[in-house]
Each structure stands twice: as C-alpha cells, then as structure tokens.
Image (cartoon, rainbow, N blue to C red):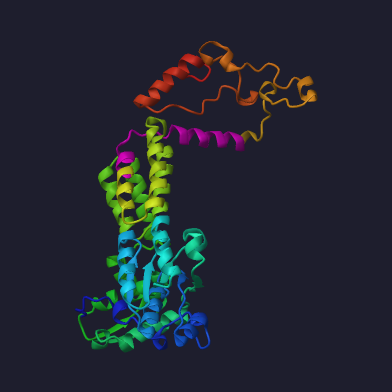
Amino acid sequence: MINNNIPLAERIRPYSLDTYIGQQHLVGKGAIIRNAIESGTIPSMIFWGPPGVGKTTLANIIANNLKMPFYSLSAISSGVKEVREVIEKAKLNRKTILFIDEIHRFSKSQQDALLGAVEKGIIILIGATTENPSFEVNSALLSRCQVYILKSLDREDLVKLLDFALKTDVELKKISISIKEYDALLTISGGDARILLNLLELVVQSVHGKELVITDALVMEMAQKKVALYDKGGEMHYDIISAFIKSVRGSDPNAAIYWLARMIDGGEDVAFIARRLVILASEDIGNANPTALVMAINCFDAVRVIGYPEARIILSQATAYLAASPKSNASYTAINEAQRLIHEYGDLPVPIHLRNAPTKLMKAQGYGKEYNYAHDFENNFIQQEYFPEKISGTKLYDPGLNAREEELRQRLKKLWGKKYNY
C-alpha cells in the first residue's frame, strides 16, 4: 500500500534528457532542443501539444541543465501581478526561465506584460499550450518565441513509461508488480502520461498484499469506482458540460455554479464555457428575458479579455443570472420548424410583391409592385402576405408562457387576428 502523498507522476519526473520519454524529434541526438541545451543558448519558446506529453517536464529539464533560476506559473491561477513579480526578481539575477503552463489562457493584457522582459532578455519564456498558438497567443509575443510541436505519445512510449515507473519509483518497488495487460491502462489514459501514471498508482493503491498482477479487468474495475478525471477531450468533459447546461435550463443556479466550478478547476477553456452561455441565453431563455443574451455576450467578451483566474467571477455572475431567468425555447423551436419546412417543401418561390426590382425588366414583370411599405400605414403595420403561398398561415413562433412573451402574444394577436391563431 502506497502512503506517499506526492503523486507518482511527480515522483518520477525526469530531470535529464537521458530519462525523458518521447519527443525524439526535439530531444534526440542532434535534435534542435538537445543542441540548444548542450550549447547553453536557449531562446524563448512555446511548446504546443496535447495534455500529458511532457511539456512541463521538458521545461524543468532545460532549467536544470542550464542551472538557471526557474519560476513556474499557471495561467489558470496567475495574472499580471504574478508575472511582474517574477520579472522584478529576474532583474536582480542573471537570466531567468519563466514557465507558464496553459499560456493560451492568458488574456491579451497578461501576455503584453511579458513582452518587454522577453525582448530585453530579462526572462527566457517557455510557454505550454494545448491550443494552436497562432490563434491563442498574440502576434507580438509569438514573434519573439520559437514554437515547437510536441507529439502525442505512442503506445511504445507509454509502455516504456509504465516500465520505467515500476523500475525506478521507491514506493512501487515495495510491491511485486507485473503488468499482464496494457490495453485498459492505455485506453483510459487517452495518451496522457500524467493520467496514465495516476491510474497506475490508483490500481496499486487498491492492493493490500505484496504482489499485484495488473489486468484489463482490474484496471476497468478500479477506474469505474474511483477515477474522476476532467479530460477536455473525453467523456467526463461532455458529461459535466451537459450537467451544467441542464442545471441552467432547469433554473437551478446552485447546481449550475457547482458544475461551473468543476469545469474551471478542470482547466476548461474560458471561451468554451462562455460560448455555451451565449447559446443557452437564446435557446433556453430567449424572449422570456432578452437581457439574458446581452448578459451572455458581455460575459463572453469580458472573460476573453480578463482571462483566469478573475474570469471565474464573471462566469459565475452570468451563470447565476441565466439560471434564475424565466425560460422559453420558443425561438429555438421556431427555427427548427422553419428548417423542417424547408427540407419538406424545398426552395419555395419568393412572392413576387416581396422581390427586389433593381432592373427595368424586373419592374416590368411586376417585381415588388404590390408591396405595401409598413411605415406608410397606421401603427406601422398592414396585413399582407410574407410567406410563399404554399405554406401561408404557418405559425412558427409560438410565444412562451411567461410575462414578457405574453405581451408579444397579445400584440401579434391584435395585428394578425386569426391568421396565425395567436
């Protein structure tokens, strides 16, 4: 039984290229990063690759080999204040390496705070990102950095990592462990080395004896019982966003904010969450509270400028407002029904009186001739046909049963009488 509180992934983190697994195109013999380390000349750089492929580890190896002061920040929990503190410390020392995990989550102002120090060589920036830096890192900072792509670890790399852990970790060596089957470990981890090692340790912790044979069945049993991973590309990601959406739709701000916190702590992209709120504001609230869409759009714009950690407050405010708002899916239902009609009837012709007439020939054919300009009539309205003849009288928008849409219903009923049966 393992009693060490330090996770396995951290206990066996390598500090030299000799024990680093994967990314041979960057660190193999004669490769660009190995050459840079050996020459002692490291540029500011950005590591771009999926989670758990060794971005943080490689940054640590560079700092360890060059014997430079090393600071590590996470874009999820750090802001301009923390960046400036590191820069001030770096000014008092020789060159300093600043590693920023998930740098794509930094807002423009946070990224701008790095520019001067990088340009003057006060710090060597190493950023890590799972997103395309061309879109997520501002061009001024990107132009001052080399971008290196880290590839997903293949099966051979992951098996090698497991074997390395069993042979080198002091805690694991206390138990006689053999891996009979690898498929479940590799499949559940999804190629993420950190998740793989966490899963291995979870399985080992279930053992109370001195021997353990790891099989796919054992791994699946333990994973189903205890593993609660927020993998942005995996099933948990979709389950949690589903719970979040349904909590807002169900008018439960308490549960909605809980699921929001789960996403934030899991490192979910701030724009992804805000984008879902914008969709919710129209799909599930709509004209029951039109201000919800205004709130959601302002939230989307704000969090992209602010970034984590403060963006969590803005997301919480918008989530609470949308969850507490009256609900209507009338607009959502209307567009669905309209598209169904198009698929059923095809491209029905535009009534001739609604057609534009930019040429003399079109005017001669009667285009726009009998169109009535609504503003020429009392109350800026006159009944006329706007549908293709074949589907005339079809009611698509049926206002919801809420105070605001009831006002719309009464207005439409007054204007259209029995045509649309409001």
Relative to 376, say whether 265 is above or below.
below
Relative to 11, say whether 408 is above or below.
above
Q: Is residue 18 magenta?
A: no
Q: Is residue 324 magenta?
A: yes
Give the x, y percent position of residue 52. Answer: 40, 72
Relative to 361, say whether 331 is above or below.
below
**Residue 366's image quarter?**
top right
Near-viewer residue (67 or 398): 67
The image quadrant where one finds the N terminus is: bottom left
Read off the magenta span.
319-343
Residue 338 visible from this viewpoint: yes
Q: Residue furthest top?
A: 378
Residue 132 visible from this viewpoint: no
The tally of labels here is 0
Give the prevailing secondary structure in the magenta stretch: helix
Near-viewer residue (344 or 149): 149
Residue at x 34%, y 70% (from the top left corner):
220
Give the x, y percent position of residue 201. Answer: 29, 77
Relative to 201, say whether 100 is above or below.
above
Residue at x 54%, y 15% (from the top left corner):
381
Give the x, y percent position of residue 70. Answer: 33, 76
Give the x, y percent position of residue 270. Answer: 39, 54
